[in-house]
Image (cartoon, helix red, strand yellow):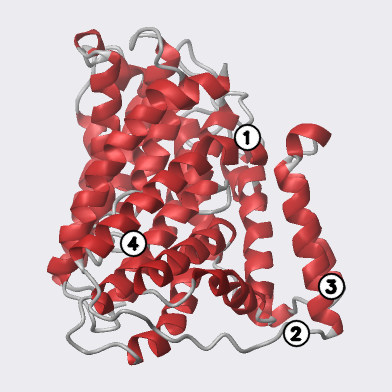
Amino acid sequence: MKLDTKQIVGISIGLLGLISPFFFQLEGLSDAGHVALGIFFLAAAYWMLEPFPIYATSVLVIFLQVILLSQQGFLFPESTAQYTPDDYTAFIGTLASPIIILFLGGFVLADAAVKYDLDRNLTRILLSPFGKKPGSIVLGLMVVTALLSAFMSNTATTAMMMTVILPIMARIGKTDPLRIGLSLCIPFAANIGGIATPIGTPPNAVVIGALSQQGINIPFGEWMILATPLVVVALLFTWFLLIKMFKPEAESIEIDMSGKFNTSGNAILLYIAFAATVLFWVTESFHSVKSAIIALIPVVFLTLSGVVTKEDIRKLPWEVLWLVAGGISLGISMKSTGLAEWIVGSIEWSSFGTISLLVVFAGVSVLMSNFLSNTVTATLLIPLAVSLATSGVAGEGFNLIIVSLVIGVSASMAMMLPISTPPNAIAMSTGTIQTSNMAKAGISVGIFGIILVVIYALFYWPFILN
Protein backbone atom coordinates (compact mmCIF):
# COMPACT_ATOMS: atom_id res chain seq x y z
CA MET A 1 0.00 0.00 0.00
CA LYS A 2 1.50 3.30 -1.11
CA LEU A 3 1.01 6.13 1.39
CA ASP A 4 0.79 9.80 0.51
CA THR A 5 2.12 12.64 2.68
CA LYS A 6 -1.23 13.27 4.35
CA GLN A 7 -1.54 9.62 5.37
CA ILE A 8 2.02 9.49 6.70
CA VAL A 9 1.41 12.61 8.80
CA GLY A 10 -1.88 11.21 10.11
CA ILE A 11 -0.35 7.84 10.99
CA SER A 12 2.59 9.53 12.74
CA ILE A 13 0.33 11.79 14.83
CA GLY A 14 -1.83 8.81 15.84
CA LEU A 15 1.15 6.69 16.88
CA LEU A 16 2.64 9.61 18.80
CA GLY A 17 -0.66 10.02 20.59
CA LEU A 18 -0.75 6.30 21.41
CA ILE A 19 2.68 6.19 23.05
CA SER A 20 2.81 9.67 24.58
CA PRO A 21 0.93 8.80 27.83
CA PHE A 22 3.60 6.17 28.59
CA PHE A 23 6.26 8.87 28.97
CA PHE A 24 4.67 11.01 31.67
CA GLN A 25 2.59 10.41 34.78
CA LEU A 26 -0.72 12.21 35.07
CA GLU A 27 -1.75 12.69 38.68
CA GLY A 28 -4.86 10.76 39.64
CA LEU A 29 -4.94 8.64 36.48
CA SER A 30 -4.31 4.90 36.76
CA ASP A 31 -1.77 3.05 34.63
CA ALA A 32 -4.64 1.51 32.71
CA GLY A 33 -6.09 4.98 32.29
CA HIS A 34 -2.83 6.12 30.65
CA VAL A 35 -3.11 3.22 28.19
CA ALA A 36 -6.75 4.07 27.47
CA LEU A 37 -5.76 7.71 26.96
CA GLY A 38 -3.19 6.67 24.36
CA ILE A 39 -5.80 4.59 22.53
CA PHE A 40 -8.20 7.56 22.69
CA PHE A 41 -5.55 9.89 21.20
CA LEU A 42 -4.82 7.42 18.39
CA ALA A 43 -8.54 6.93 17.64
CA ALA A 44 -9.21 10.67 17.63
CA ALA A 45 -6.27 11.35 15.29
CA TYR A 46 -7.15 8.56 12.87
CA TRP A 47 -10.87 9.36 12.87
CA MET A 48 -10.18 13.05 12.25
CA LEU A 49 -7.32 12.80 9.76
CA GLU A 50 -8.41 9.50 8.15
CA PRO A 51 -5.07 8.00 7.12
CA PHE A 52 -7.10 4.79 7.16
CA PRO A 53 -10.85 4.35 6.64
CA ILE A 54 -12.70 5.25 9.83
CA TYR A 55 -14.22 1.77 10.13
CA ALA A 56 -10.70 0.28 10.02
CA THR A 57 -9.71 2.57 12.88
CA SER A 58 -12.68 1.29 14.89
CA VAL A 59 -11.52 -2.30 14.49
CA LEU A 60 -7.99 -1.23 15.45
CA VAL A 61 -9.38 0.37 18.61
CA ILE A 62 -11.10 -2.89 19.59
CA PHE A 63 -7.92 -4.87 18.86
CA LEU A 64 -5.72 -2.55 20.94
CA GLN A 65 -8.11 -2.76 23.87
CA VAL A 66 -8.11 -6.55 23.70
CA ILE A 67 -4.31 -6.89 23.66
CA LEU A 68 -3.57 -4.03 26.09
CA LEU A 69 -6.50 -3.69 28.51
CA SER A 70 -8.31 -7.03 28.73
CA GLN A 71 -7.66 -9.93 31.11
CA GLN A 72 -6.15 -11.81 28.18
CA GLY A 73 -3.92 -8.88 27.19
CA PHE A 74 -0.26 -8.24 27.83
CA LEU A 75 -0.37 -5.41 30.39
CA PHE A 76 -3.12 -6.19 32.92
CA PRO A 77 -3.71 -9.95 33.15
CA GLU A 78 -4.72 -9.55 36.82
CA SER A 79 -6.63 -6.99 38.83
CA THR A 80 -4.80 -4.15 40.53
CA ALA A 81 -5.86 -1.69 43.21
CA GLN A 82 -6.81 0.82 40.51
CA TYR A 83 -8.05 -1.36 37.67
CA THR A 84 -9.99 -4.58 37.24
CA PRO A 85 -9.57 -5.63 33.60
CA ASP A 86 -12.57 -6.71 31.56
CA ASP A 87 -12.67 -10.02 29.76
CA TYR A 88 -11.75 -9.61 26.11
CA THR A 89 -15.33 -10.46 25.14
CA ALA A 90 -16.44 -7.10 26.57
CA PHE A 91 -14.58 -5.38 23.74
CA ILE A 92 -15.12 -7.71 20.78
CA GLY A 93 -18.70 -8.30 21.91
CA THR A 94 -19.55 -4.76 20.81
CA LEU A 95 -19.45 -6.05 17.22
CA ALA A 96 -22.68 -7.88 18.03
CA SER A 97 -24.14 -5.59 20.70
CA PRO A 98 -27.90 -4.96 20.74
CA ILE A 99 -27.30 -1.58 19.09
CA ILE A 100 -25.48 -3.24 16.19
CA ILE A 101 -28.31 -5.75 15.77
CA LEU A 102 -30.84 -2.91 15.83
CA PHE A 103 -29.02 -1.16 13.00
CA LEU A 104 -28.58 -4.42 11.11
CA GLY A 105 -32.35 -4.91 11.11
CA GLY A 106 -32.81 -1.39 9.83
CA PHE A 107 -30.25 -1.93 7.07
CA VAL A 108 -31.94 -5.15 5.93
CA LEU A 109 -35.34 -3.44 5.80
CA ALA A 110 -33.93 -0.45 3.91
CA ASP A 111 -32.08 -2.65 1.42
CA ALA A 112 -35.20 -4.68 0.69
CA ALA A 113 -37.30 -1.50 0.37
CA VAL A 114 -34.96 -0.19 -2.32
CA LYS A 115 -34.81 -3.55 -4.07
CA TYR A 116 -38.60 -3.75 -4.45
CA ASP A 117 -39.21 -0.01 -5.02
CA LEU A 118 -41.12 0.45 -1.77
CA ASP A 119 -39.25 3.69 -1.13
CA ARG A 120 -40.15 5.17 -4.54
CA ASN A 121 -43.80 4.20 -4.25
CA LEU A 122 -44.06 5.68 -0.78
CA THR A 123 -42.50 8.87 -2.17
CA ARG A 124 -45.06 9.01 -4.98
CA ILE A 125 -47.98 8.60 -2.59
CA LEU A 126 -46.67 10.95 0.08
CA LEU A 127 -45.88 13.72 -2.43
CA SER A 128 -49.29 13.72 -4.11
CA PRO A 129 -51.11 15.85 -1.46
CA PHE A 130 -48.67 18.77 -1.77
CA GLY A 131 -49.93 20.15 -5.06
CA LYS A 132 -48.05 22.12 -7.70
CA LYS A 133 -46.86 25.29 -5.94
CA PRO A 134 -43.05 25.41 -5.58
CA GLY A 135 -43.11 26.08 -1.84
CA SER A 136 -45.49 23.18 -1.25
CA ILE A 137 -43.42 20.86 -3.43
CA VAL A 138 -40.24 21.70 -1.48
CA LEU A 139 -42.09 21.04 1.78
CA GLY A 140 -43.42 17.75 0.41
CA LEU A 141 -39.98 16.64 -0.70
CA MET A 142 -38.55 17.46 2.72
CA VAL A 143 -41.33 15.65 4.59
CA VAL A 144 -40.94 12.53 2.42
CA THR A 145 -37.15 12.62 2.70
CA ALA A 146 -37.29 13.01 6.48
CA LEU A 147 -39.77 10.14 6.83
CA LEU A 148 -37.66 7.80 4.70
CA SER A 149 -34.45 8.91 6.43
CA ALA A 150 -35.96 7.99 9.80
CA PHE A 151 -35.95 4.33 8.74
CA MET A 152 -33.30 4.23 6.02
CA SER A 153 -29.71 5.34 5.62
CA ASN A 154 -29.49 9.11 5.20
CA THR A 155 -27.10 8.55 2.32
CA ALA A 156 -29.34 6.04 0.52
CA THR A 157 -32.38 8.26 1.04
CA THR A 158 -30.59 11.28 -0.41
CA ALA A 159 -29.30 9.33 -3.40
CA MET A 160 -32.81 8.11 -4.16
CA MET A 161 -34.52 11.46 -3.61
CA MET A 162 -32.00 13.32 -5.77
CA THR A 163 -33.21 11.21 -8.69
CA VAL A 164 -36.78 12.24 -7.81
CA ILE A 165 -36.01 15.96 -8.06
CA LEU A 166 -34.12 15.74 -11.38
CA PRO A 167 -37.29 15.70 -13.55
CA ILE A 168 -38.71 18.49 -11.38
CA MET A 169 -35.62 20.62 -11.94
CA ALA A 170 -35.88 19.98 -15.69
CA ARG A 171 -39.16 21.93 -15.65
CA ILE A 172 -37.58 24.94 -13.91
CA GLY A 173 -35.66 27.77 -15.55
CA LYS A 174 -31.89 27.49 -15.24
CA THR A 175 -31.67 30.83 -13.44
CA ASP A 176 -34.49 30.10 -10.98
CA PRO A 177 -33.11 30.07 -7.37
CA LEU A 178 -35.57 27.26 -6.70
CA ARG A 179 -33.06 24.89 -8.30
CA ILE A 180 -30.66 25.59 -5.43
CA GLY A 181 -33.43 25.26 -2.85
CA LEU A 182 -34.49 21.90 -4.27
CA SER A 183 -30.92 20.59 -4.25
CA LEU A 184 -30.39 21.65 -0.63
CA CYS A 185 -33.77 20.60 0.76
CA ILE A 186 -33.07 16.89 0.22
CA PRO A 187 -29.77 16.53 2.14
CA PHE A 188 -30.91 18.92 4.87
CA ALA A 189 -34.16 16.98 5.37
CA ALA A 190 -32.27 13.67 5.36
CA ASN A 191 -29.88 14.92 8.05
CA ILE A 192 -32.74 16.18 10.22
CA GLY A 193 -35.08 13.24 9.60
CA GLY A 194 -32.49 10.73 10.78
CA ILE A 195 -32.83 12.15 14.30
CA ALA A 196 -36.40 10.85 14.63
CA THR A 197 -35.71 7.15 15.31
CA PRO A 198 -32.95 5.07 16.94
CA ILE A 199 -32.04 3.59 13.55
CA GLY A 200 -32.18 6.88 11.63
CA THR A 201 -28.50 7.81 11.92
CA PRO A 202 -25.40 6.34 13.64
CA PRO A 203 -25.07 9.10 16.31
CA ASN A 204 -28.40 7.89 17.69
CA ALA A 205 -26.90 4.44 18.08
CA VAL A 206 -23.89 5.92 19.86
CA VAL A 207 -26.22 7.65 22.33
CA ILE A 208 -28.28 4.52 22.96
CA GLY A 209 -25.14 2.40 23.27
CA ALA A 210 -23.60 4.77 25.84
CA LEU A 211 -26.81 4.86 27.87
CA SER A 212 -27.20 1.08 27.74
CA GLN A 213 -23.74 0.76 29.30
CA GLN A 214 -25.20 2.70 32.24
CA GLY A 215 -28.21 0.39 32.48
CA ILE A 216 -30.57 2.86 30.81
CA ASN A 217 -32.80 1.64 27.98
CA ILE A 218 -34.69 4.04 25.72
CA PRO A 219 -37.46 2.18 23.88
CA PHE A 220 -37.93 2.86 20.19
CA GLY A 221 -41.23 4.63 20.73
CA GLU A 222 -39.88 6.76 23.58
CA TRP A 223 -36.99 7.93 21.41
CA MET A 224 -39.52 9.01 18.79
CA ILE A 225 -41.52 10.90 21.41
CA LEU A 226 -38.34 12.67 22.51
CA ALA A 227 -37.00 13.43 19.04
CA THR A 228 -39.91 13.79 16.60
CA PRO A 229 -41.26 17.15 17.85
CA LEU A 230 -37.76 18.61 17.51
CA VAL A 231 -37.46 17.14 14.02
CA VAL A 232 -40.77 18.73 12.97
CA VAL A 233 -39.73 22.18 14.20
CA ALA A 234 -36.25 21.94 12.64
CA LEU A 235 -37.74 20.72 9.36
CA LEU A 236 -40.26 23.58 9.17
CA PHE A 237 -37.59 26.15 9.99
CA THR A 238 -35.27 24.75 7.32
CA TRP A 239 -38.08 24.74 4.74
CA PHE A 240 -38.96 28.38 5.53
CA LEU A 241 -35.27 29.34 5.40
CA LEU A 242 -34.67 27.72 2.00
CA ILE A 243 -37.81 29.24 0.48
CA LYS A 244 -36.78 32.71 1.66
CA MET A 245 -33.11 32.37 0.73
CA PHE A 246 -33.81 30.87 -2.69
CA LYS A 247 -37.17 32.38 -3.55
CA PRO A 248 -38.87 30.54 -6.46
CA GLU A 249 -39.61 32.37 -9.67
CA ALA A 250 -41.94 29.70 -11.06
CA GLU A 251 -45.56 29.83 -9.90
CA SER A 252 -46.35 26.14 -10.41
CA ILE A 253 -44.58 22.91 -11.39
CA GLU A 254 -46.04 19.79 -12.95
CA ILE A 255 -44.91 16.48 -11.42
CA ASP A 256 -45.47 13.04 -12.92
CA MET A 257 -47.08 10.89 -10.20
CA SER A 258 -47.55 7.74 -12.29
CA GLY A 259 -46.45 4.35 -10.99
CA LYS A 260 -47.68 1.37 -9.02
CA PHE A 261 -46.65 -0.91 -6.17
CA ASN A 262 -44.76 -4.10 -6.85
CA THR A 263 -47.23 -6.96 -6.29
CA SER A 264 -44.83 -9.88 -6.57
CA GLY A 265 -44.77 -12.47 -3.83
CA ASN A 266 -41.44 -11.25 -2.45
CA ALA A 267 -42.62 -7.64 -2.42
CA ILE A 268 -45.73 -8.57 -0.44
CA LEU A 269 -43.59 -10.46 2.08
CA LEU A 270 -41.46 -7.33 2.41
CA TYR A 271 -44.53 -5.16 3.04
CA ILE A 272 -45.64 -7.54 5.81
CA ALA A 273 -42.19 -7.62 7.42
CA PHE A 274 -41.78 -3.85 7.17
CA ALA A 275 -45.18 -3.10 8.71
CA ALA A 276 -44.77 -5.67 11.50
CA THR A 277 -41.27 -4.52 12.44
CA VAL A 278 -42.15 -0.82 12.55
CA LEU A 279 -45.35 -1.56 14.48
CA PHE A 280 -43.48 -3.58 17.10
CA TRP A 281 -40.76 -0.94 17.32
CA VAL A 282 -43.10 1.97 18.01
CA THR A 283 -45.13 -0.06 20.55
CA GLU A 284 -42.12 -1.37 22.48
CA SER A 285 -43.23 0.34 25.70
CA PHE A 286 -46.44 -1.72 25.64
CA HIS A 287 -45.07 -5.22 25.00
CA SER A 288 -41.54 -4.71 26.51
CA VAL A 289 -39.79 -6.68 23.77
CA LYS A 290 -36.44 -4.94 23.18
CA SER A 291 -36.02 -3.11 19.88
CA ALA A 292 -32.86 -5.12 19.12
CA ILE A 293 -34.84 -8.35 19.40
CA ILE A 294 -37.53 -6.94 17.13
CA ALA A 295 -34.80 -6.00 14.63
CA LEU A 296 -34.15 -9.71 14.14
CA ILE A 297 -37.63 -10.13 12.61
CA PRO A 298 -36.71 -8.70 9.20
CA VAL A 299 -33.24 -10.28 9.32
CA VAL A 300 -34.68 -13.76 9.88
CA PHE A 301 -37.93 -13.48 7.92
CA LEU A 302 -36.56 -11.77 4.83
CA THR A 303 -33.50 -14.04 4.53
CA LEU A 304 -35.46 -17.27 5.09
CA SER A 305 -38.06 -16.25 2.51
CA GLY A 306 -35.42 -15.28 -0.06
CA VAL A 307 -36.59 -11.68 -0.23
CA VAL A 308 -33.06 -10.69 0.80
CA THR A 309 -30.40 -12.82 -0.88
CA LYS A 310 -26.75 -13.57 -0.20
CA GLU A 311 -25.76 -10.86 -2.67
CA ASP A 312 -27.97 -8.35 -0.86
CA ILE A 313 -26.39 -9.23 2.48
CA ARG A 314 -22.93 -8.62 1.05
CA LYS A 315 -23.97 -5.10 -0.02
CA LEU A 316 -25.09 -3.98 3.44
CA PRO A 317 -23.04 -1.09 4.95
CA TRP A 318 -21.10 -3.24 7.38
CA GLU A 319 -18.52 -0.47 7.79
CA VAL A 320 -21.09 1.63 9.66
CA LEU A 321 -21.66 -1.21 12.12
CA TRP A 322 -17.92 -1.54 12.69
CA LEU A 323 -17.62 2.20 13.28
CA VAL A 324 -20.38 2.22 15.89
CA ALA A 325 -18.95 -0.90 17.57
CA GLY A 326 -15.56 0.77 17.89
CA GLY A 327 -17.14 3.78 19.53
CA ILE A 328 -19.02 1.64 22.05
CA SER A 329 -15.83 -0.28 22.82
CA LEU A 330 -13.88 2.94 23.36
CA GLY A 331 -16.52 4.10 25.81
CA ILE A 332 -16.18 0.86 27.78
CA SER A 333 -12.43 1.25 28.30
CA MET A 334 -12.69 4.95 29.13
CA LYS A 335 -15.19 4.14 31.86
CA SER A 336 -13.57 0.97 33.28
CA THR A 337 -10.05 2.49 33.47
CA GLY A 338 -11.28 5.68 35.10
CA LEU A 339 -10.11 7.81 32.16
CA ALA A 340 -13.47 9.45 31.51
CA GLU A 341 -13.92 10.26 35.20
CA TRP A 342 -10.38 11.68 35.36
CA ILE A 343 -10.98 13.94 32.34
CA VAL A 344 -14.21 15.22 33.85
CA GLY A 345 -12.55 15.77 37.21
CA SER A 346 -9.70 17.78 35.68
CA ILE A 347 -12.05 20.59 34.57
CA GLU A 348 -13.70 23.09 36.90
CA TRP A 349 -17.25 22.37 35.80
CA SER A 350 -18.78 24.21 38.74
CA SER A 351 -17.91 27.49 36.99
CA PHE A 352 -20.43 26.63 34.27
CA GLY A 353 -24.17 26.98 34.70
CA THR A 354 -26.56 24.35 33.36
CA ILE A 355 -27.53 26.42 30.33
CA SER A 356 -23.95 27.30 29.44
CA LEU A 357 -22.95 23.63 29.66
CA LEU A 358 -25.74 22.63 27.32
CA VAL A 359 -24.79 25.39 24.88
CA VAL A 360 -21.12 24.33 25.00
CA PHE A 361 -21.90 20.66 24.33
CA ALA A 362 -24.38 21.48 21.56
CA GLY A 363 -22.09 24.06 19.97
CA VAL A 364 -18.97 21.87 20.07
CA SER A 365 -20.93 18.94 18.65
CA VAL A 366 -22.25 21.00 15.73
CA LEU A 367 -18.85 22.57 15.09
CA MET A 368 -16.96 19.27 15.12
CA SER A 369 -19.56 17.51 12.99
CA ASN A 370 -19.20 20.10 10.25
CA PHE A 371 -15.61 18.97 9.74
CA LEU A 372 -15.76 15.35 10.94
CA SER A 373 -18.22 12.51 10.62
CA ASN A 374 -21.17 13.12 12.94
CA THR A 375 -20.70 9.57 14.19
CA VAL A 376 -17.07 10.26 15.06
CA THR A 377 -18.09 13.46 16.85
CA ALA A 378 -20.68 11.65 18.95
CA THR A 379 -18.25 8.81 19.63
CA LEU A 380 -15.60 11.20 20.97
CA LEU A 381 -17.87 13.49 22.99
CA ILE A 382 -20.52 11.27 24.52
CA PRO A 383 -18.26 9.16 26.80
CA LEU A 384 -16.92 12.39 28.29
CA ALA A 385 -20.33 13.93 28.68
CA VAL A 386 -21.76 10.77 30.21
CA SER A 387 -19.01 10.77 32.82
CA LEU A 388 -19.74 14.41 33.56
CA ALA A 389 -23.40 13.68 34.06
CA THR A 390 -22.79 10.64 36.28
CA SER A 391 -20.19 12.43 38.40
CA GLY A 392 -22.74 14.97 39.55
CA VAL A 393 -20.34 17.91 39.26
CA ALA A 394 -22.55 19.65 36.71
CA GLY A 395 -25.27 20.35 39.23
CA GLU A 396 -28.95 19.59 39.33
CA GLY A 397 -30.98 19.42 36.15
CA PHE A 398 -28.09 18.08 34.06
CA ASN A 399 -28.83 14.39 33.76
CA LEU A 400 -27.31 11.47 31.92
CA ILE A 401 -29.95 11.03 29.24
CA ILE A 402 -30.30 14.71 28.40
CA VAL A 403 -26.59 15.41 27.97
CA SER A 404 -26.29 12.41 25.65
CA LEU A 405 -29.29 13.55 23.63
CA VAL A 406 -27.87 17.06 23.32
CA ILE A 407 -24.66 15.77 21.74
CA GLY A 408 -26.26 13.09 19.56
CA VAL A 409 -28.98 15.35 18.17
CA SER A 410 -26.65 18.33 17.72
CA ALA A 411 -24.26 16.19 15.68
CA SER A 412 -27.00 15.75 13.08
CA MET A 413 -27.57 19.51 12.84
CA ALA A 414 -24.20 20.09 11.15
CA MET A 415 -24.67 20.63 7.41
CA MET A 416 -22.54 23.65 6.53
CA LEU A 417 -20.04 22.01 4.15
CA PRO A 418 -20.02 19.29 1.48
CA ILE A 419 -17.77 17.23 3.79
CA SER A 420 -20.13 17.62 6.76
CA THR A 421 -22.36 14.67 5.79
CA PRO A 422 -22.61 12.20 2.89
CA PRO A 423 -26.03 13.66 1.90
CA ASN A 424 -24.37 17.07 1.49
CA ALA A 425 -21.68 15.56 -0.70
CA ILE A 426 -24.30 13.88 -2.89
CA ALA A 427 -26.15 17.18 -3.30
CA MET A 428 -22.94 18.93 -4.34
CA SER A 429 -22.34 16.30 -7.00
CA THR A 430 -25.39 17.56 -8.94
CA GLY A 431 -23.46 20.68 -9.93
CA THR A 432 -26.49 22.84 -9.16
CA ILE A 433 -25.19 24.39 -5.96
CA GLN A 434 -21.99 26.03 -4.77
CA THR A 435 -20.33 25.60 -1.39
CA SER A 436 -21.30 29.19 -0.54
CA ASN A 437 -24.98 28.33 -1.01
CA MET A 438 -24.68 25.36 1.31
CA ALA A 439 -22.63 27.25 3.88
CA LYS A 440 -25.04 30.19 4.02
CA ALA A 441 -28.04 27.95 4.67
CA GLY A 442 -26.14 25.40 6.74
CA ILE A 443 -24.78 27.95 9.22
CA SER A 444 -28.30 29.26 9.84
CA VAL A 445 -29.65 25.74 10.36
CA GLY A 446 -26.75 24.90 12.69
CA ILE A 447 -27.25 27.96 14.88
CA PHE A 448 -31.00 27.39 15.03
CA GLY A 449 -30.30 23.73 15.82
CA ILE A 450 -28.15 24.65 18.83
CA ILE A 451 -30.85 26.97 20.17
CA LEU A 452 -33.56 24.39 19.55
CA VAL A 453 -31.65 21.54 21.21
CA VAL A 454 -30.93 23.64 24.30
CA ILE A 455 -34.60 24.66 24.59
CA TYR A 456 -35.73 21.04 24.34
CA ALA A 457 -33.05 19.98 26.85
CA LEU A 458 -34.27 22.55 29.35
CA PHE A 459 -38.01 22.20 28.97
CA TYR A 460 -39.35 19.35 26.82
CA TRP A 461 -37.04 16.41 27.50
CA PRO A 462 -37.13 16.77 31.32
CA PHE A 463 -40.94 16.85 31.13
CA ILE A 464 -41.08 13.63 29.08
CA LEU A 465 -38.44 11.80 31.09
CA ASN A 466 -39.89 12.59 34.52
Mark 4 element type: loop
Q: Which mark is residue 269?
A: 3
Q: Which is nearer the N-term, disc 1 or disc 4? A: 1
Tell me: 179 left or right of 159: left
Tell me: 414 left or right of 437: right
Name the front one of labels 1 and 4: 1
Query: What is the x, y in percent for residue 111?
Result: 64, 72
Query: What is the x, y in percent for residue 249?
Result: 23, 78
How many residues crowd around disc 3 within 10 Å: few (fewer than 14), some, or many (20 or more)?
Answer: some
Q: Residue at x 45, y 84 (%)?
A: 163
Q: Which residue is mark 4?
A: 421
- Could you tell me the amino acid type at mark 2? Asn
- Give the answer, above or below, for where 284 lies relative to 103: above
In three-dimensional space, the C-alpha distance between marks 3 and 2, rounded to whole angstroms, equals 11 Å
Quadrant into which the C terminus falls: top right
Query: What is the x, y in percent for residue 430?
Result: 29, 83
In three-dimensional space, the C-alpha distance between marks 1 and 2, rounded to whole angstroms, equals 33 Å
Q: Are marks 1 and 4 in contact (CB under 8 Å)?
A: no
Q: Which mark is residue 222?
A: 1
